[in-house]
Image (cartoon, rainbow, N blue to C red):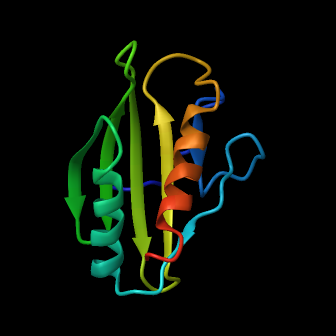
Amino acid sequence: MTTNLPCPDSPNCVSTQATDDGHAIAPFRYRKSRAEAKEALKDIIRTLPRAKLVEEDESSLRYEFTSLLFRFVDDVEFLFDDHAKTIHFRSASRTGYSDLGVNRRRMEEIRSLVEGKL
């Protein structure tokens, strides 16, 4: 699993590895061990509504977030870079053109929840 897939041209994706302003977002940083940071992130995401962990390996997590009203699914992938103590991520809508900023807001909400806990 990897988060290095580029965002599409549509404004329904954010990625720490994007270079354009419309899609770029800052990664999360962690101080704990990768395993501890991963468990802390999982604990935080577990508190969010309609989030389902669908894949996990030693250095990555993949979630599906489902919208309440229309049941749209967004894919969110986290990749832990232990050398740089950085969590790269990509959050993208599976369908549609615009997400009205939902993916960016979700990732900034997660950023505020993980602050000081990783």
Spot occupied by residue 12 in the image (x, y as percentages of width and height): 59, 30
Q: Extreme right residue here? A: 21
Spot occupied by residue 33 in the image (x, y as percentages of width and height): 35, 87
Spot occupied by residue 14 in the image (x, y as percentages of width and height): 59, 44
Q: Is residue 69 left or right of residue 6?
A: left
**Looking at the image, residue 10 lies above or below residue 15:** above
| Rendered image quadrant of residue 10 | top right
Spot occupied by residue 34 in the image (x, y as percentages of width and height): 34, 80
**Looking at the image, residue 107 lies above or below residue 69:** below
* Camera sees residue 32: yes
| Rendered image quadrant of residue 1 | bottom left
From the viewer's side, name the closer residue of 64 and 113. 113
Q: Number of labelled discs?
A: 0
From the viewer's side, name the closer residue of 83 and 106. 106
**Residue occupying the point 39% across, 12% down:** 70
* Camera sees residue 5: no
**Residue occupying the point 52% across, 16% down:** 96
The quadrant of the picture occupied by the C terminus is bottom left
**Looking at the image, residue 73 lies above or below residue 54:** above
